[in-house]
Amino acid sequence: MTELGSDTLPSVGQWQQILSAPPVWRVKVQAASWTSAALALRDQGGRLLGLWGEAGHENAFFYIHALGLGSTGYLWITLTVQSSEGQFPSLADIFPAASRMERALYDLTGIRATGNTDTRPWLRHQCWPAGIFPLREGQLDGRSFGVDGDADYPFQLIDSVDVHQIPVGPVHAGTIEPGHFRFSCIGEQILRLEERLGYTHKGVERLFQDRDVFAGARLAGRISGDTTAGYAWAYSMAVESIARCEIPPRAAALRAVCLERERMANHLGDLAALGNDAGFVFCQSQFLFIKENLLRENREIFGHRYLMDCIIPGGVAFDLNSAQIATMQRNSESWQRTVQRLDLLLQEHSGLRDRLVGTGKIAPARAAALGMAGLAGRASGQAWDLRVQFPHAPYQNLDVSMQLSPEGDVAARWQLRFREFYESVRLQTQLLLDLPGGDVSATIPESIPDGEALGIVEAWRGEVFVALSVENARIKRCHPHDPSWVLWPVLEEAVLNDIVADFPLINKSFNLSYSGHDL
Amino acid sequence: MTSLIIWRDQCFQILFAVAAAPLLAGWLKTVRALLQNRRPAGILQPYRDLFRLFHKEAMIPEQSSWLFRFTPYVMFGAKVMAVAIVPIIANGLPLASAADVIALVGLLAVARIFQVLAAMDTGTDFGNYGAHREMLISALAEPALLAALFTASLLARSTSLVQIVHLSQIQLFSLHPSMVFAAIAFGFVLLVENARIPVDNPATHLELTMIHEAMVLEYSGRHLALLEWAAQLKLFLYMTIGFALFLPWGIAANPLLTSLVIAAGLVLVKLFFAVVVLALVETLLAKRRLFRVPEFAITGFLFGVIGLLSHFMLGS
């Protein structure tokens, strides 16, 4: 246990540092200190990343977990709730993002957040009967459910004869994930947008339970296909923390190569998609061309286009030889040149600029109040980047430069993707240049000790974290958390000054995960 | 000229237009694909699409009225009627005297009214949005089209397309400044009316941004085939009206079959180049914000008005 920096931790109990880089602090609190811990965190400019629940032995008690981020690092606060109480104080008034997480927490564990006026189901749809709480013990044995969506979900509508509703989704015309968007409009002007998610709920958290930690790694890599390196790394970090295993420096460097390549691929794909949504197909085909080349190189060198199963507990499942490194360096340099040319070209395309600038704006003050982070947060001036503020191996030696913009519009999120792409290319170049020798993985014992841990990395959308608890070498509880949880509600606000026809562009500029959110 | 021969020419022109319209669409898609580094599906793809759609079941939305079912036939019929009127490969055809430029614009307006009503008939939000966007934009494009046509009419001192084409054929190389402005105005109208980029994106899958596509979302099978064919005919029609007004060289002056075939070949050559220009425009521009589209249409109208004014100020 380290005492470093603990003076700025909210004084709500006995803090314990459970991970050194990135620093994760853990405390178990009573109901009385739960809200004051959140208030203290907010007052020091911190934010809430995630909120999740866990059923104790024979559903006799429940743990309510919250992960916040403050100046000292990540704060993991756990509240114990007896099943006779069945409720805990809501944090929705302190952190707006908590509201949906509390609704999801109720759907999964049946513990209600008191004070949250929104008691509608969130992940639960019609096919899943009320009163079934999948994360409680013995609730699902032998039961099977249908696939019915919601027929009568009570949307919060504006009650006026002049306002009409546009229901969009969950089935869309393109090959995108399912989600429902309910617009209340007057003419083209959007008065309110309400999202309805949960269509891709597949019971991932339940699927983790009773697997061994290696099978869990495969599952973690499949939570959200576009963030497979992010999830696999966060999960592996948690496993290694429980097993007290130090990964070799070469493995850490190779993991970062995977993470940065994932960032590059997704940023290129988003730039292409934004061009397409602006009706500018030239832009789409140019970026997709580079992205496809990158994915093919992934398949050739890493064995998988999206890098699935490359990161495993203990290290990585591949190694690079000097010929492969030379190829990667050569190609990334040529992609960088092409992207730079496109960047300059597109900055002068008046038609495209007109679509992007000023659209879907979230000002920095609102972004801070909404707890934004990740790429979308940095585009609204929120200076959070785990790789910069709390660098873990191998990022301590790389001097990552944080890309920020105060504008908060689609153009800012567009431009930031360029800048982060350049930075990722630089990081990959540096990592491959100084690649340490040695093993690419350490051994994780089959008989892993019991314990709880948290792994967290800055994936391309923002911080992805995985909270893991292991008992008898089996996963007892695993909660993967996507930054989309915090960002989905922001999208509802970002469209308010724009018209219906601009929604697809704004939505794409965020490009949030459905699968990572619905679990 | 016996009446039998001119009716043969008339039939030839209609069949030529109806048969060549999908080819035009296929060529446009091919050029666009090549400009975007994509492998084209082939210039004949629109024919295959039409064939496929004609063999599919046509679904009718519940609670829709006769309007929904009639509209594809009205749309297609109106476009066939229009290509009969415009001098495409021969001038002075029998049906050409049935309508002047004002009636032609009216004929297109009838088709539009049916399409908009049918889109609203389904009661879906996307149909309604497409319909009201279409009306917003076309209310501004129609005067621009009329201004361009009137500029040509002022020169010919007649609103008859036959007279306009006849005049420009006898004064082959005379240059009229007013016609340059009219041509620019017509170019704007062509982009707006045919739902091309930067006004609308014919290839988009985003329901919320669509204009023309939103109005036909509920159609399927033979109804959709007719609507697509009608849209292809509309593009063919606008391009050939443009040729008749501004590039009338090669339109057959006598009813001999050989001159008809030569005229048809020349039309295809003109279309070949016109499509390349259109594809370039569509590739270089991004789609505009919806509320900037009226500005675009008004710019077209402005050019049309300048054309009219310059006719009076500079003389013919």
Image: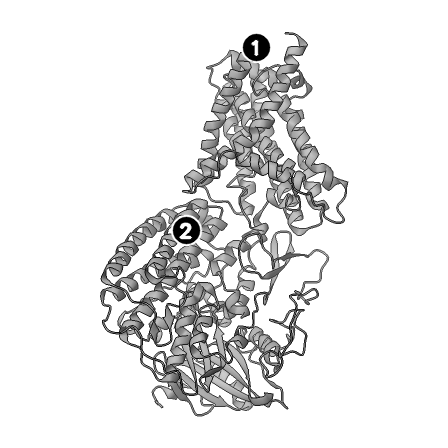
Q: Which mark is residue B113?
A: none
Question: Can the viewer see residue A70 in this picture?
Answer: no
Q: Is residue B171 above or below residue B226?
A: above
Labels 2 and 1 touching (C-beta < 8 A): no
Q: Is residue A509 above or below residue A99?
A: above
Say which residue label 2 marks.
A288
Q: Is residue A187 above or below residue A142?
A: above
Position of residue A440 in the picture relative to residue B64 (left or right): left
Of the pair A507 and A432, the residue shown nearer to us: A432
Q: Quadrant of residue A386?
A: bottom left
Which image quarter holds the N terminus of chain A?
A: bottom left
Give the residue type that dot 2 points to: Leu
Q: Residue at x 42, y 63 (%)?
A: A379
Give the residue type that dot 1 points to: Leu
Q: Is disc 2 placed on a helix, strand or loop?
A: helix
Say which residue label 1 marks.
B256
Confirm whether circles 2 and 1 share one chain. no
Q: CA distance from mark 2 to mark 1?
A: 53 Å
